[in-house]
Amino acid sequence: MPRLIRLYIQQVLAGFGLATVFVGILLWQNVANLYHLVTHTEAGLLAVFLLWLFNGLVFASVQFAISVMRMQDNGTPPSGGKRDMVLDYQPVRVPVDQAPRSRLSPRRP
């Protein structure tokens, strides 16, 4: 199995494991009266499953993104991109000829 696929499966399992712990703590601590809501309704089991599923998707994607961003090649300098000169712009004074303004009295209606 390719290394990246194995890493993805590991991170998905870790993310859904974290989601299981997270949803368990939410129900155990009765956050926002959630335990009472899911135990006193017909769709409570579905609600818990969907809460676990969507949190698992989020946690798994974050786990995988962090692990991919932490991957690096040891000792390999970054390559690619353009090696253009960096231009250092200097401001230039531009003279402007302007006739002096005359003071007009304010208009009266």
Image (cartoon, helix red, strand yellow):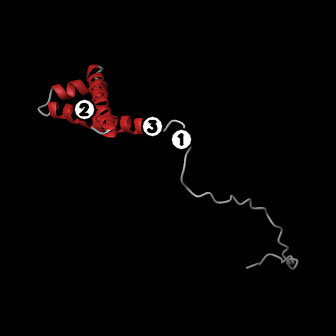
Q: Disc 3 or disc 2, which is closer to the eye? A: 3
| Residue at the image position 14 percent from the left and 30 percent from the top | 41
Q: Which residue is mark 1?
A: 76
The residue that mark 3 highlights is: 71
Compared with 92, 64 (above or below) is: above
Asked if the residue at tag 1 contacts the one at tag 2, i.e. Cβ–Cβ closer than 8 Å, the answer is no
User: Amino acid under label 2?
Assistant: Trp
For this view, does 10 lie left or right of residue 46?
Answer: right
Image location of residue 85, percent across then percent down: 68, 59
Q: Residues within 10 Å of mark 1 (few under 14, many from 20)?
A: few
Q: Quadrant of residue 100?
A: bottom right
Name the quadrant containing residue 66: top left
- Amino acid type assigned to the residue bearing label 1 in the image: Thr
- The secondary structure type at the circle numbered 2 is helix
Answer above or below: position of 6 versus 91.
Answer: above
Using the image as rendered, state which of residue 49 and residue 79 is in the foreground: 79
Residue picked out by circle 2:
52
Q: CA distance from mark 3 to mark 2?
A: 28 Å
Which quadrant would residue 35 be assigned to in this image? Answer: top left
Residue depicted at 30% across the width and 20% down the height: 29
